[in-house]
Amino acid sequence: MYKLSLQRIVMILAICLLGIFFAVPNFVKDPKTTLPSWWQPVNLGLDLQGGSSLLLEVDMTTALKDRMQTLEDSARSALKEARIRYQSISSDEKGLKVKIESTNSRAKAMVPLRKMDDGLKVTDNGNDILVVTYDEPALNEIKRKLIDQSIEIVRKRIDEYGTNEPIIQSQGEGRILVQLPGVQNPEEVKVLLGKTAKMTFHLVDSSTSVAEAKRGKLKSSSRIIRGIEGEQYVIVRKPAVGGETLTDAGVSFQEGAPAVSFKFNNLGAKKFGEVTKNNIGEQLAIVLDDEVISAPTIQSAITGGSGVITGNYTSESAQELALLLRSGALPAPLNILEERTVGAGLGADSIEAGIFASVIGFIGVVVFLVLAYGLFGLFTTITVFLNLFLMLGALSLIGATLTLPGIAGIILTIGMAVDANVLIFERMREEVKTGRSIKDAIESGFSIAWGTIIDSNLTTLIAAAVLFYFGSGPVRGFAVTLSIGIATSMFTSVTVTRLIIAAWFNRYKPKALPI
């Protein structure tokens, strides 16, 4: 019988012990508090431990409308630079309308208007109006970026909130699926995700009062906006400093009251310093989600690149605002289309059903192995049992999330784990029937069947890779457990079984094959 080297035996045993070691937390009560963070059990998905599921939709109409309003300011600047006289500029989510009565001026204006952004097209509708819109490829690219950016911001906010192993992914056109295992009351999360948290800094237009603005004496460069207390302000339309330059935010205390401190990056700090330096005595409105949350008077130049927002904040509301500012502003509002809560009891039932199915499957496999292959069937039973530990250990080590389809993948690999042994043992039988010795039959069983084992497992692994690439959520969970199961079953069914049979043969020197 082929003898394994001591180095190879130590390596095989070491892998087995490591697998068992990392699988142990799955059998410990309350491991999150009793075990270190690097030694934790498999994370359970929404369908196993309960939690909340939210289906969100990105408000494309509002996002495109905001983008067109930005183009509106760019159009004014572009036409002013080109010295083209226009009568009016308006915008909606579909495009920009520029009224120019002169035919020559309309023709001349097409070039600067088209250059404002990539993918813009300008058409003359024949009624002294130029219509500026995005072409189809550019519009699709804008929408794709809105989805990707929204997913990233949602992920940051959920991570800041502290939810363990959330699932955040796009679903369909313009929709985002958020699954939060362990969160039974999603109200706080809904509030967190429902706020756009777009913060900008605007100078208050001190030359125009609110009363004058309401009577129509409002400059095109200014607009009326309300504050959180219901008061109204006239602010400069263009932000003095954009919220995208914020790098950090946190809770601080001013005269014993909670406040929100913030910091800018270098560009934001420079702009903020210039604005405060050149406008001492003026009010600077801090606008969050189109609402003034504070409008302090600039007392002196602020050049340190940081500031403080004060108001009637509690510790919780200040912490929430700081969290929103840290994670960044959503590019568009999110609408909640569907909300679903899975109870912890239902998750426990799923786990019990999964364990029951696993036990029944394991017993069925063991009975078949013992009846068909006798002693070698018992050896295979040991490797199948070890395979379960290695799978759990691997899933725990990589921090995978186990879902109900993942349990199905584990159950499937219990049956698949013995495929290689069946091929090996049947080959041994055939070799004995041809008159070969027990030793040669065992060696041939492992060496000749190896090619078939590789082929069968490789095709299954390719199928799992396809499921992982094209699937999402639970389908990917199934693909991950199936892939890990294939890898561990090949190791246990071939390498570990060979080690056990080699040790048995060298110890007892049998005269007949016990199959």
Image (cartoon, rainbow, N blue to C red):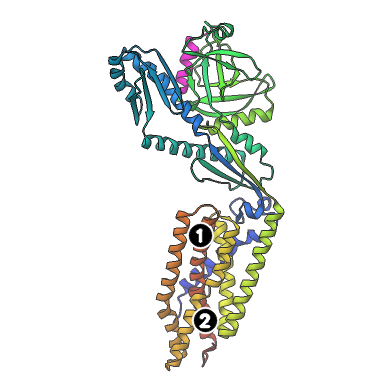
Q: Which residues are magenta?
A: 268-281
Determine which residue is flagged by label 2: 501
Viewer-proximal residue among 271 and 20: 271
Q: Residue at x 63, y 31 (%)?
A: 320
Viewer-proximal residue among 233 and 275: 233
Q: Quadrant of the N terminus?
A: bottom left
Determine which residue is flagged by label 1: 479
Please rate how many residues cluster around mark 1, counting C-alpha atoms within 10 Å: few if below 14, some from 14 to 19, many from 20: many
Q: Nearer the viewer, mark 1 or mark 2?
A: 1
Kindly tell me whether residue 115 is visible in this rendering: no
Outermost residue, front side: 126
Q: CA distance from mark 1 to mark 2?
A: 32 Å
Q: Please state the horizontal and vertical placement of residue 51, each as a whole percent of the image.
A: 65, 48
Of helix, strand and loop, which mostly describes the magenta segment? helix
Viewer-proximal residue among 212 and 371: 212
Viewer-proximal residue among 4 and 490: 490
